[in-house]
Amino acid sequence: MASVTVWNEFVHEREGGDAAEVYPDGIHATIAEALDQRGHDTRTATLDDPEHGLTESVLDETDVLVWWGHVAHDEVDDDVVERVAERVYDGMGLLVLHSAHASKPFKRLLGTPCDLTWREVGERERCWVVDPGHPITDGLDDSLVIEEAEMYGEPFGVPEPDRLVFTSWFEGGEVFRSGCCYRRGRGNIFYFRPGHETYPIYHREDVQQVLDNAVRWATPNEGADAHAGNRNVDPRESL
Amino acid sequence: MASVTVWNEFVHEREGGDAAEVYPDGIHATIAEALDQRGHDTRTATLDDPEHGLTESVLDETDVLVWWGHVAHDEVDDDVVERVAERVYDGMGLLVLHSAHASKPFKRLLGTPCDLTWREVGERERCWVVDPGHPITDGLDDSLVIEEAEMYGEPFGVPEPDRLVFTSWFEGGEVFRSGCCYRRGRGNIFYFRPGHETYPIYHREDVQQVLDNAVRWATPNEGADAHAGNRNVDPRESL
Amino acid sequence: MASVTVWNEFVHEREGGDAAEVYPDGIHATIAEALDQRGHDTRTATLDDPEHGLTESVLDETDVLVWWGHVAHDEVDDDVVERVAERVYDGMGLLVLHSAHASKPFKRLLGTPCDLTWREVGERERCWVVDPGHPITDGLDDSLVIEEAEMYGEPFGVPEPDRLVFTSWFEGGEVFRSGCCYRRGRGNIFYFRPGHETYPIYHREDVQQVLDNAVRWATPNEGADAHAGNRNVDPRESL
Amino acid sequence: MASVTVWNEFVHEREGGDAAEVYPDGIHATIAEALDQRGHDTRTATLDDPEHGLTESVLDETDVLVWWGHVAHDEVDDDVVERVAERVYDGMGLLVLHSAHASKPFKRLLGTPCDLTWREVGERERCWVVDPGHPITDGLDDSLVIEEAEMYGEPFGVPEPDRLVFTSWFEGGEVFRSGCCYRRGRGNIFYFRPGHETYPIYHREDVQQVLDNAVRWATPNEGADAHAGNRNVDPRESL
């Protein structure tokens, strides 16, 4: 059981329309509730909160940060992005969802454009497990079939993942590396493609299972008492 | 808590001399006891047991197999090696210790010679943590200092590890990738260099901590219900 | 320009039918001619040749070995497999084509089952470049579109590739990691999925381009004068 | 043969003292000359040049950028850093030398602190080849022995390298991952630890060989005509 903070820019859902219908309290509320029901201790934070809700004290109590953003990436303060990056180096897990491929924290931590091709026509996605022994796939079938999805296509401008867990097939002919694991410092990062602001993907049982698995996988462990920080050290052996 | 089988060829320790003094009941007994005290359910198996003690029923109840061998690698039956490999593909963890770098299961699963340079003069080893966030390093300092060790040197003839956790420094001037993680099929494999048949390395608290951590890391999880087996399948989409 | 040996079990094409029509002189002849035209020095070898045509002297003059097999994997002599593996450790490149995913050399060198799901109904394949800066993709478009192909589906029972270059989309709904790079010892290995004994895939310009690129990528370089071989060495530093 | 730009902050060598004696025209001049003699087309650029000498037109003609910096990392303009990062994504190679582990372009492209421990007492370094088949090691012995070096120690705060080529042993008891390969976008990045502003390390034949090899390894290739850029695309298949 982890202490999870679900962050959402929370823009689409307050503008009415489909997003408001599908996620009336915001995507963050739906995800937080799903994780809460699976035993995690959850809170939420949004763009409009002071310091985007990601104060030092909130991050002090966060094992895993879940990040959703789409139209307001640029409004996220750079100091908060640095703060999140520092926490990841120290071990905080980070789950990056769908359109957060273009979020500041993800691009900052991976060091690449994280760009892709896309299409929004509600086509079918088959998100295949390509690493069936990975803990993020616990309890899944061989694939998640999503009847209506936005397409994301290769090339995906990220570093080669440490492990590739999912690869998606799209009705329109594309493929995409939909589940990518990275470590940066002591922190585990998982990018998970499925999701959208108007398709009800985060209400799905299997998607919630993935999020739960990913939170467990990304939860920090103790590690070794070994630190650098560009510091001068004495020799261990006599010279 | 995992169900662990500790395998040992059990040759040196029955020939008297230093090995018998340091590990009177065999290296397997020392390791099994250490893991038992840390909460695991342990059993042992040796070369002389029928089927080397690694029957189908024993492996059925084994989450993680620990392997120690040195002078009798060639006496291990190839059928048992295949059986172990199959279990690893299905998720069984495998810990490969010190001179078991040249054991049949390790070479079979990695597909490479797994050779190295060596020297046995009792020099000092500093086994450094290079991946301080890795769960196998939980609770360690920045390095394990072993006053008397056999040297293993690069190049180590293995595939590039999925993650490199430890790198050793030796008094005589060499380095070695001493902690290497691999996955083959659903199974996690960890090679850990420190250890020897006459130096009392497996009696050390920090080494036992690594073994405990590695057992926990290598314990199988459920994974996805996704299987290949070279089988013909129907299309998911209409053609 | 490399010295290339193209190996083929050469069974289907001698049995008449479609295979004989599409590859009247054998798949090896088509591939060797394509590589020859692109500047390589090529020869061929088949199952029925003495030592399968892979004598020590042939391998002495081989920079890159291309391997095609399908129905006769089991007829390949284990000693020849070991000989090929040894050469790969010493730097010989190995290209593994399509159904050779189940060949002895590939399974021997990777250490895994290399299994997959498959279907043979002549569906469309889109083989996407997912690593557009990789030299094996030089001169390609964003994907290879193959109108009639046998499907191979995930999970593909191989170690996580060192680099994933291609991922295929299939009309029937599956995906597959179709271009996988590995190094074993000093040798570079590339698995390339597209190909078949009756579809004319090896006659395609873009597929031949990939084979040419892959041969160049897999050609051995000098490397360092650093060798292990499980040998005892003197200390570099005074002890 | 590549078109190489050698960048140096060029501070130490103009302040007199040992640095001025060892590298009277600057480290960049020594490295550029060495690469020029090995057949590359070289130019240099320094911090004090307009736009640090890294204008768009200079980068247009640069296959591989070599970067040396130590005390003036913070004076490098962020716009130039972004320009360099963009070029790397498009395929420009980047060699990062010694204390440039803390340079802005390296940290920007890797997304991590890139910190380490250090000690400057002129101790012996043995920089071992751990990947003897890698082209960056062409023509080397099993190690580079540097009689007087600054120590850099683990943990090195970088992402797990795509390939680890060198690992250093230090007289004082530490180890370090001294040769690390990365790819970001289409660009190849190589970090090489040996070097210093007052020890004459860049005058060594073997170190110059590594730099030459690394330049060749990092030289861009054509790649595939596959691009993302977060753009909307039409379906390839009928929906």
Image (tube, coloured by chain):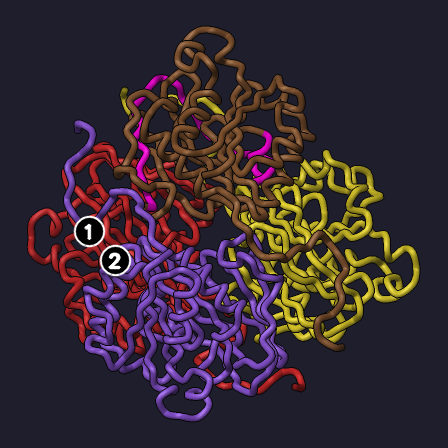
Chain colours: A purple, B brown, C yellow, D red
Extreme residue toward the right, this view: C16
Tell me the subunit letter for badge 1: A
Q: Position of residue C130 (x, y in %)?
A: 53, 68
Q: Which disc number belongs to residue C98?
A: none
Q: Residue at x 53, y 30 (%)?
A: B5
Does residue D68 appear left or right of residue B137 in this picture?
left
| Total tally of numbered discs in the picture | 2
Image: magenta residue range? B104-131
- B56 or C180: nearer the eye? B56
Residue for badge 1: A229
Helix, strand or loop under label 1: loop
The residue singled out by tag 2 in the image is D113
Residue D22, placed above or below residue D216? above
Image mark 2: chain: D
Is residue C213 in view from this perspective?
yes
Q: Amino acid at mark 1?
A: Gly
- Local SS, label 2: loop
* Residue drawn at point x = 12 percent, y = 55 percent: D12
Q: Quadrant of residue C167?
A: bottom right
Q: Residues within 10 Å of mark 2 (few under 14, many from 20)?
A: many
Do we see residue C216 in this rendering? no
Q: Residue at x 23, y 48 (%)?
A: D116
Marks 1/2: CA–CA distance: 8 Å
Residue placed most toward the observer, A69 or A45:
A45
Give above or below for A92 relative to A46. above
- Magenta segment: does it hold A206? no
Check the image and report above or below for A136 versus A44: above
Type of amino acid at the residue the image marks with label 2: Pro
Q: Are marks 1 and 2 in contact (CB under 8 Å)?
A: yes
Residue C96 x/y as whole percent: 67, 53
Front position in the image: D154 or A164: A164
Picture quadrant of residue C14: bottom right
